[in-house]
Image (cartoon, coloured by chain):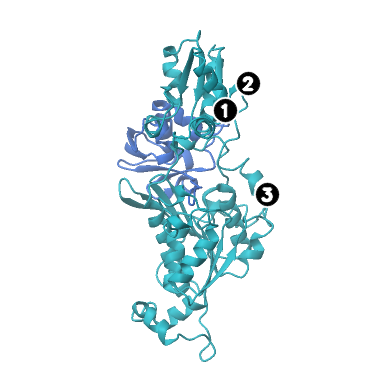
Chain colours: A cyan, B blue
Amino acid sequence: MATKTIVTPSAPGKGATLSNEEILRYSRHLIMPEVGMEGQLKLKKARVLLVGTGGLGAPLGLYLAAAGVGTIGVVDFDKIDFTNLQRQIMFSNTDVGRPKIQAAADRLGALNPDIRIERYETQLTSENALEIFRDYDIVVDGTDNFPTRYLVNDACVLLGKPNVYGSIFRFEGQASIFGYPDGPCYRCLYPEPPPPGLVPSCAEGGVLGVLPGIIGSIQAMETLKLIIGKGEPLVGRLLLFDALGMKFRELKLRKNPECPVCGTNPTVTKLIDYVEFCGIRGEEAPAPQTTVPEMTPRELKARLDRGDDLYILDVREPHEYQICNIGGNLIPLGDLSRRVNELDSAREIVAHCRSGKRSAEAAEFLRSAGFRKIWNLKGGILAWSDEVDSSVPKY
Amino acid sequence: MAIKIMIPTPLRAYAGKKDSVELQAGTVGEALAALTAQYADLRKHLYAEDGRLRSFVNVYVNDEDVRYLQKDKTQLNDGDTISIVPSIAGGARR
């Protein structure tokens, strides 16, 4: 894929120039012929929108600001919490509780006072996406859910903006550029999102700390290349990264002529309801329809204190049990059908997990297997920590 | 033909926690059938109820998407690598 012009250089004489301070700051760019004064002025003129300021957004924001991208827009509506700090290196301990967008603007502004940060403290929706995207040259997708990914993709295709894509899961990442002139889009790769329920549950989630740094840095590099118009952009190629094996692989990505958004006869010509398109919540299954009675943590505590004979069944994974437990008997959900004979159907069983979702599934399964005295602990170990014993850590 | 199938992280739980599986097959369809025969739990993650490959799971022979080859009937050569690449959404992850 030949390089196309995304940011046009300013006309001689009337464009922006660099101050002496900027020349010093960008010296290591300016002395490279691939960037030079022309490339640096393109960077200064460029307008890049970051959707999401999380794990991917952290290296993206920092590197784009450091490199002198003149205008960086940031979209996020979240607040920083302690679980973010393991990988979201734009934020500090003292930022916990602050809106991400404020902390990001402060951090990027402190790193490079010569650039402009435009804040959008809002959830990206079908109603506001086109309006927000319109004034940017490039959109960088650092989101964490399917509805927003399809929304970003479709909006970029409709507006003809390149979409620098990155995605991560545990220790594996993907990166590519969609929406490039004549290039494929995200829907060419994946026409539809997974239905809720077929996506790995919270037990299998998680992300190795450095991974978003690597994938986000690749996105930042591709963004810089698009702006300066040099090199071979990651278009028509899906880069796969496996951190455990420390292997990069590359797959061919083709523009699908039948793509509903960017194909020859598109059926999606305006933004749709992406939450509906992706199923409820997009990433998580709806709470399973359960007929199993629930027990609150307080009720459980009261009954245990009374000395009732209850069998506590913990259906989480062994590595979760090591983080914390409430003395339950561990049989991970995935092993339950194999180990069901270890349970005594004559006893009352209270199933629990981290939040109550997996244990509802386990309880439902046990009922179908003939167990009658089965309860699901409402809200799981998180609720136990909130309502009964705050010494049990939450994770 | 001796084939290697790369199992992506989200599906390893349904494939004995393996990151790759080696088996004998002549076509992509045969390879995936042999894989899901060995690991039955994988089936519902790869195929929809109508028996078609799910639209959020792509299958590649070496670096080429089988949708642009002969899909299930794509012939395999000794030493080919099949990659199963499902969509993943993570990024910021709250």
Quadrant of the rendered image containing residue B84: top left
Q: Position of A6 compared to B31: left or right?
A: right
Calculate the distance from the C-alpha at mark 2 to the C-alpha at mark 1.
Answer: 13 Å
How far separated are the C-alphas under marks 3 and 1? 31 Å
Q: Which mark is residue A291?
A: 2
Identify the secondary structure beneath mark 1: loop
Q: Residues within 10 Å of mark 1 (few under 14, many from 20)?
A: many
Indicate the position of residue A21 as horizontal and vertical percent values: 41, 84
Residue B36 seen from this side: yes
Task: Tell me the quadrant of the picture where the N terminus of chain A can be found.
Answer: bottom left
Q: Which residue is mark 1?
A: A378
Q: Secondary structure at mark 2?
A: loop
Question: Where residue B24 sits in the image (x, y, percent)?
Answer: 33, 33
Q: Nearer the viewer, residue A372 or A221?
A: A372
Q: Are marks 2 and 1 in contact (CB under 8 Å)?
A: no
**Foreground mark, 3 or 2?**
2
**Residue position marked by numbered label 3 in the rendering:** A273
Q: Is residue B80 above or below residue A90?
A: above
Identify which amino acid the numbered label 3 is placed on.
Answer: Asp
Using the numbered discs, state the Cα–Cα distance from disc 3 to disc 2 in whole angstroms.
31 Å
Q: Amino acid at mark 2?
A: Thr
- Which x, y percent locates residue A91? 45, 58
